[in-house]
């Protein structure tokens, strides 16, 4: 480096250190994750900037935060006054309700696109596996293949795996491409919920059609009635939850195996100083599955040893990490807000990413520590990162090359290595199928024991706590406090995505965490031997929660539609448009759903009234907001109790716990 360049680099480093100091916010204020905190301290010393620093130094735009601006045409951008929302309209005359509804709709469209494009990619892989063109992946779970096929009306008796699989492919393709009719997985929706959707005209046709229509309707001068726009939001979001996401989950299970509980470690302590460390971060499981094969290749292990390492250590992050954690017990190093921090360890030899939630900032942090950052998906290139494309019919070419480069980096490691000595064991890998089996036993896998325990009050209700982390709130804190509060009040918590990882790091995904639960939930957990918090996988695996709610309704005794259930959903630290799509498909499915951090809405508007109470009046669920986790828990419990009361379950009932004897009796 030239002298002048060196001086500029030192000045830049000092400036960054001074800026972060001047914000007055320390790593301790930014996160409760000790490993992330330790790495943020190191980053500060090293003069390295992360999203935490940028969030501290860049205030969110208050007009945008209230969704009170529009840039849908060049007569604008138009800014309205969120404090006096009806005092102004846009140049075209658009009101605050139209503007907010259009902004919200485009978030739903973007989030739904991400999930459906992911699901469609999985379906493409599935088709080529069945055709024999892709040989690196196989149909691993034929039992699940038959179950899914039967659930959409495909005959399985006496037929070959290939024939069933091809029929399933053609049937599920309709989820995306169908222009008229209803998507295949509506067959899984409780009758009364489906009846409400039909009455409201929100049963999805195909995801492509719904997303295209939302983009059309939100163009200037098309749909200018917030109620009509929200209707299309519901239709599009449902095409994600019961469509794109559900297909992604089911096809991934068929190809790579349906998860069953597995003990695994989470946190940065999963990195090993004397191994070649490879991280996979993103959302589609196929790259990760190929990487698993690469790191277990004897030739590559030998090469790592020749380079002086003890072996190759593969670790996941974010959602593809959560999927492979669930399926194979591969260790997981952290959630979305730890992806830059982990590079600060200096121990990451290569990070391979595919799609979604990949911060562009990773590229500069990786450079600071001479770590490799590889993009692998044609949809996601990052300036400054090397692109090694994963071609589906020869995935090993990509993943082997990543490993080879990681070995080279290990051999020439120059960065100072500091790995936080923290890892948290937990049980991961619950699926709706396993919950059924776990509670009902092998004699009769059934949701009856769960329903009975809800009816007798031992379990007060069910909550889905999911979603991202966000540097605008204290990382992991809102997730952890909310979940602790819920289980203390006998609410069984189902988790996915980054939230699951927050709780795993807090040690709540262990059966021992039952001591933090209320007496009723504790008793159930101790009898069954399960944690009070069940991890179901990645963001697309929220579809597992939808199926579980549907099964609970179908089991009987808790109302006729999903909206009747004593259940609630939350995304306490959300940040992505995918989270909005997920939130809205839960609401449209009938679930009370509360978000934290912030909400893109202006108070005292008709649009807000519709989302926060009007949809419930139509027989759907409802949106809500609370930044504080205790307030959030209070609101969720109030909703659960409201539903219990409506079901006549507010009076205490005789408690019947299903032990082995009871299960045998059921089977008799
Ligand atoms: Fe302004 Fe209307 Fe154009 Fe939006 S669509 S930028 S509100 S003129
Ligand atoms: S990765 S969408 S930050 S959960 Fe699915 Fe985490 Fe949210 Fe991304």
Image: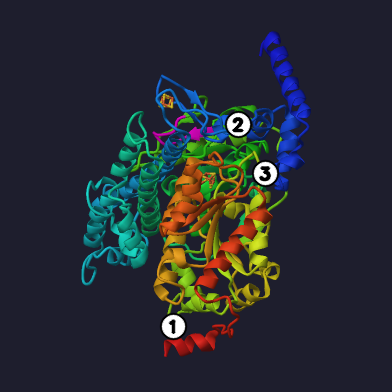
- The quadrant of the image that shows the N terminus is top right
Gap in angstroms between the C-alphas marked 2 and 1: 57 Å
| Circle 1: element type | loop
For marks 2 and 1 on the same chain, the one whose residue lies earlier in the sequence = 2
**Any atom of ligand 2 within 8 Å of the CB at mark 1?**
no
In this picture, residue 406 sits left or right of residue 394? right
* Residue 133, placed above or below residue 390: below
In this picture, residue 190 sits left or right of residue 170? right
Kindly identify the residue that appears in the image at 25 percent across and 45 percent down.
177
| Circle 3: element type | loop
What residue did someone put label 3 on?
273
For marks 3 and 2 on the same chain, the one whose residue lies earlier in the sequence = 2
Residue 373 on the magenta segment: yes
Question: Residues in magenta?
Answer: 370-381
Kindly identify the residue that appears in the image at 47 percent across and 62 percent down.
259
* Camera-nearest label, 2 or 1: 2
Residue 134: image location, x then y, percent: 30, 47
Residue 309 on the magenta segment: no
* Camera-nearest label, 3 or 2: 2
User: Do the CB atoms of the residues marked 2 and 1 lie less than 8 Å apart?
Assistant: no
Residue 372: image location, x then y, percent: 56, 32
Q: Residue furthest top?
A: 4
| Circle 2: element type | helix
What residue did someone put label 2 on?
62
State the predominant SS element of the stretch in magenta.
loop
- Which residue is at the front of the view, 356 or 551? 551
């Amino acid at each position: 480096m030239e002298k002048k360049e060196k001086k500029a680099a030192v000045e830049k480093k000092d400036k960054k250190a001074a800026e972060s100091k001047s914000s007055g916010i320390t790593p301790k204020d930014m996160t409760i994750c000790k490993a992330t905190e330790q790495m943020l301290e190191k980053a500060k010393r090293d003069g390295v900037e992360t999203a935490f620093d940028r969030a501290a130094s860049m205030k969110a735009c208050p007009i945008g935060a209230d969704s009170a601006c529009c840039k849908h045409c060049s007569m604008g951008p138009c800014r309205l006054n969120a404090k006096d929302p009806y005092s102004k309209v846009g140049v075209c005359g658009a009101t605050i309700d139209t503007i907010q509804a259009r902004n919200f709709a485009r978030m739903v469209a973007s989030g739904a696109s991400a999930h459906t494009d992911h699901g469609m990619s999985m379906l493409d892989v599935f088709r080529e596996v069945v055709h024999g063109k892709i040989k690196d992946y196989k149909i691993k779970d034929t039992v699940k293949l038959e179950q899914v096929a039967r659930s959409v009306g495909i005959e399985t008796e006496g037929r070959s795996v290939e024939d069933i699989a091809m029929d399933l492919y053609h049937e599920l393709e309709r989820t995306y491409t169908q222009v008229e009719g209803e998507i295949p997985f509506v067959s899984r929706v409780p009758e009364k919920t489906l009846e409400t959707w039909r009455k409201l005209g929100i049963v999805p046709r195909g995801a492509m059609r719904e997303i295209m229509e939302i983009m059309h309707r939100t163009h200037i001068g098309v749909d200018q009635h917030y109620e009509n726009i929200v209707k299309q939001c519901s239709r599009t979001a449902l095409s994600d939850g019961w469509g794109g996401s559900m297909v992604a989950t089911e096809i991934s299970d068929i190809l790579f195996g349906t998860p069953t509980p597995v003990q695994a470690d989470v946190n940065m302590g999963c990195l090993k100083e004397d191994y070649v460390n490879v991280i996979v971060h993103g959302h589609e499981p196929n790259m990760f599955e190929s990487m698993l094969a690469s790191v277990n290749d004897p030739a590559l292990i030998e090469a790592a040893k020749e380079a002086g390492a003890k072996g190759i250590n593969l670790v996941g992050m974010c959602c593809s990490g959560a999927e492979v954690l669930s399926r194979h017990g591969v260790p997981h190093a952290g959630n979305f807000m730890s992806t830059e921090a982990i590079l600060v360890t200096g121990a990451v030899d290569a990070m391979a990413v595919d799609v979604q939630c990949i911060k562009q900032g990773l590229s500069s942090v990786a450079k600071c520590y001479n770590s490799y950052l590889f993009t692998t998906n044609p949809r996601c290139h990052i300036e400054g990162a090397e692109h090694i494309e994963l071609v589906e019919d020869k995935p090993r070419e990509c993943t082997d090359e990543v490993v080879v480069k990681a070995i080279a980096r290990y051999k020439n490691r120059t960065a100072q290595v500091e790995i936080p000595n923290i890892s948290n064991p937990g049980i991961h890998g619950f699926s709706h199928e396993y919950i059924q089996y776990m509670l009902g036993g092998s004699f009769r896998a059934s949701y009856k024991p769960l329903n009975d325990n809800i009816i007798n009050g031992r379990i007060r209700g069910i909550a889905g706590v999911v979603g991202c982390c966000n540097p605008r709130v204290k990382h992991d804190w809102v997730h952890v406090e909310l979940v602790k509060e819920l289980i203390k009040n006998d609410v069984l918590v189902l988790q996915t995505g980054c939230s699951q990882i927050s709780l795993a790091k807090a040690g709540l995904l262990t059966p021992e965490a039952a001591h933090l639960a209320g007496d009723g939930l504790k008793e159930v957990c101790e009898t069954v031997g399960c944690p009070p918090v069940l991890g179901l996988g990645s963001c697309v695996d929220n579809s597992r929660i939808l199926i579980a709610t549907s099964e609970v309704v179908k089991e009987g005794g808790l109302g006729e539609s999903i909206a009747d259930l004593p259940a609630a959903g939350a995304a306490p630290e959300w940040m992505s448009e995918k989270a909005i799509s997920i939130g809205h498909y839960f609401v449209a499915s009938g679930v009370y759903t509360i978000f934290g951090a912030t909400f893109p809405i202006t108070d005292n508007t008709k649009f807000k009234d519709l989302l926060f109470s009007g949809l419930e009046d139509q027989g759907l669920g409802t949106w809500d907001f609370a930044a504080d986790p205790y307030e959030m828990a209070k609101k969720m419990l109030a909703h659960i109790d409201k539903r219990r009361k409506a079901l006549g379950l507010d009076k205490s009932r005789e408690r019947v716990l299903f032990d082995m004897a009871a299960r045998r009796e059921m089977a008799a």
